Amino acid sequence: MLLTIGAFVAVVLIAVGSGRCVLRSLRLVPVTAPEELLGAFGVGIGALMMGSYVLGMVGLLNRGGAVGLLTIMAAVAWAGLADVRASAPKALRLGTLGLEPPAGVLVAAILGMLILSGLVAMAPLTGSDAMHYHFTVPRIWVEAGRWQPVWWTVSGFYTGGGHYLIAFAMALESEALARVMIYAGGVAAAVGVYLLSRPLAGRLGALAAMLLFLVTPKVFWHMSTYGSPDIFAAFFATLGVLFSLRGLHDRCEGCFVIAGLFAGLCGSIKYTALALPLAILIAIVFFRRSPQLALRFGLGAAVPILLLAARNFAWTGDPFFPFLSRWLLSDDKINHWTLQASLTDTGHVYGRNLVSLLSLPFRQILQGQTYGFGHYFGPLPLAAAPLIFLSWRSSLQFRYMVVVTLVSYVAILTASRWAEFLLPVYPTALVLTVAAFGISRQWAATRKVATAAAVSFLVFGIGADALYARDFVPVAVGLESREDFLNRMAPDYQVAAFVNETLRPRSGVALVFFRHVYYLDVPFVYGDPGSSWLIDPFRDGRPDSLAARLQALKVRWVVWSGHYPQPLVTSFESLERNGWLRPVASKTVTDFRGNRILEQRTAVPVVIYEFVATPAHRLPPM
Amino acid sequence: MYSEQHDSEIRSPGATRAPAWGHSLRDVALALWIILVCSFYYSQFRELLHIKLSWLLKMM
């Protein structure tokens, strides 16, 4: 734990120091001290992401490579930390927050939320997507020392800048450092919300916006247990807006380049976050009508985005794999089953008619469980939407943020119906919400109801986050062992532990169908064609072709954990009946049924089969 | 960007201006909208709240 905290402090200081040197070399005069510090952290983190990308490319994604990268950055960081070394509180301008009663209460609540989410972030990894790919794919890269395509989950190709950072942290120290870095991304995004709100809503309004951001269940979840780098997309989105606004407001041309870099880093984190650079570019053109400034912004944004696209193009021939595969790849290279499942999984196929589109903002928030957990964002931006449009004339910054938020929201809706992808849009939406509530003072009833709505959401959010945290705090403070915690809270952990225990002494690749594979430490491939590009039910659906596919994948063990993937059930059962699959071990474990938050557990039978592909075992004709 | 002058600019009464004839109507409509959205929003958590609060009830 101490080593992790030490490594974390070193990484943050080096990121800020080196980032500051870069920003100062650009002579961004109008940028204020807090903006510069936050921007420096963004530049430093961006450098780590891209540095980690290069390490992975040249096969140095290991501890030596990570220490080397950090050492190079540290060499330039020393000068950038001169005033922080002298007095950190002064450099951070903490005195400007004020501690009179209303501000003091807000600052105390913010600190409380930061401590709570920080504690929960200390708990071992249990997030569902994190255990499927956000942490598993970087772990595979670090074990190999270089980037490589991971075909058993198509999600492996969605990895981007945030996953390079996770891989860097894992290579440097451990998974724990990667989790703490994600937490730091959330803290930085919250500071970004404060800085964006400050000119629109005043100091108290900005503190309230920061607190609302931190208590939002979606943000709390992402900062603490979710284990996804998506919160960095929100952070870079706030930086992109902040610096482009600074460029717009103070005619600082260099600010557009650095804003472009931040927006590009945001877009490099996941495909749908590409909506942010697009939206900011449109806003710059709309408000400044200057192709030159748009070009500066676009050049800054292109670098990180092209790195991501180039990697996927080199691996697959499709820079945005698998979403352009239908047009760019020959039919024999496409797993149509997995492609269709990916489109469904990312919410790409919900209705496209006008009524469906117009009702989506309501459905995402008011029926969030069905539309990608949109209800975890809270009701405030939707409640404030009419007020935001009525406040259009309030200031240039306000109008600029309305355009960025609206364009990026519509762009994400066009690509997907899944509210999960709206996290990068949320900071500006929340800033506009708080600013619009502040402007509503001319309407007495609205003002009172808006204040009550904000306070209700604060109470609801703090209560919900505290209830959620109670399962994670005991292990974080050392009252529960890691093993007991994982047995209790990590989906599929007991299945993975049984597979490890049984197969660790034996050799051979295991084919598994349970989704949460992070804690598996035997060679494996994931076989559910809902995510795995390796098994195509259209081609491998017959028992003989399935057996041939298993042989091609060098599978020796098949792990049945309560089910086979639906399109392959008949074929696997045929292999069982005909002796190609021979049971070698079995156990009944306990696991979650449905989403973990519903706290429903069920018994799951697990059988490990040996795949015996010899000529003596002939398959019957179909 | 942080000047008090800027804050006062944002707070100026002329920042947004509704026509006088629709002022009250718009005020009530906006307030009702916020109440409706929040009511629908919180109603979707009944089941989850029951599950989560059962832990508290057990503790008591």
Image (cartoon, rainbow, N blue to C red):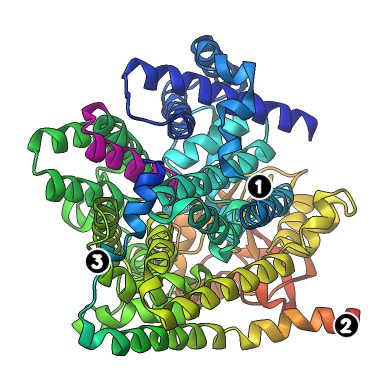
The quadrant in which the C terminus of chain B is found is bottom right
* Viewer-closest of A112 and B7: B7
For the residue carrying disc 2, how many other residues have a C-alpha within 10 Å: few (<14), some (14-19), or many (20+)?
A: few
Chain letter of disc 1 in the image:
A
- The magenta segment is A233-254
Q: Secondary structure at mark 2?
A: helix
Q: Are marks 1 and 2 on the same chain?
A: no
Residue A445 picture quarter: bottom left
Residue at 25%, 26% in the rendered image: A254
Q: Is residue A562 magenta?
A: no
Chain letter of disc 2 in the image:
B
Q: Nearer the viewer, mark 1 or mark 3?
A: 1
Q: Which residue is mark 1?
A: A99
Secondary structure mostly taken by the magenta-highlighted segment of the chain: helix
Residue at 64%, 53% in the rendered image: A110
The quadrant in which the N terminus of chain B is found is top left
Amino acid carrying label 2: it is Lys
Q: Which of the labelled discs sits on residue A414, or is there none?
A: 3
Q: Which residue is mark 2?
A: B58
A606 to A44, vertically: above or below: below
Question: Is residue A569 something that shows in the picture?
Answer: yes
Question: Is residue A584 something that shows in the picture?
Answer: no
Q: Is residue A251 magenta?
A: yes
Q: Secondary structure at mark 1?
A: loop
Q: Position of residue A543 (x, y in %)?
A: 47, 69
